[in-house]
Image (tube, grey):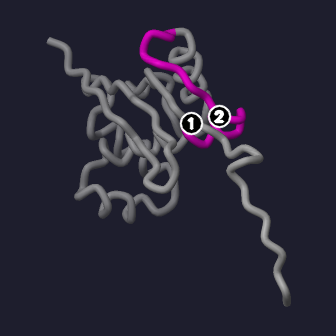
Amino acid sequence: MSNIKTYKVKDDWKDYEVTLEVDHEILTPELAREINQFWCFSDDRIDQENGSHVRVVIRLAGLYFINAMLSHDGVHFGKSNTEAGAAWSRDLTQEEGWPEKPGIRVIAASVEAPDYDSLELTELTI
């Protein structure tokens, strides 16, 4: 029986969001603990997720994808674009601190980089 669940990681300030499929047969609490503890402040993240290393790692993956997509001037694709999802998911496994098979793949994304019209210019008097 499959233990795959779908999650959305969304920025609460902008409308950045990624949809992730997580295979909980692969992303076990033990693997998630190892991934989380690779980076500083792992205890702070654990506190925010009520002790769940798995939830922490899913959010970390979402953060990775959103930041990577912003560095490409934004990305939009839906679940039907499996090629885009596969490519972005492979990128995660090439990053330091992530295993070859983390059990996480991105299946949809809506990450829009700011454009000229969304920026405001204000002269400051100092």
Q: Is residue 98 above or below residue 79?
A: below
Residue range (magenta): 65-82
Quadrant in which the C terminus is drawn: bottom right
Residue type marked 2: Gly
Left/right of residue 80 with respect to residue 69 in the rendered view: left
Nearest the eye: 11 or 123: 123
Q: Which numbered tag is attached to residue 111?
A: 1
Nearest the eye: 42 or 112: 112
> Mark 2 touching mark 1, by CB under 8 A?
yes
Left/right of residue 113 with respect to residue 122 in the rendered view: left
| Percent position of residue 83, x then y | 55, 9
Residue at the limit of the structure toward the left, as seen here: 1
N-terminal label among 2 and 1: 2
| Percent position of residue 9, x then y | 40, 41
Q: Residue at label 2? A: 74
Residue type marked 1: Val
Q: Residue at x 46, y 24 (%)?
A: 108
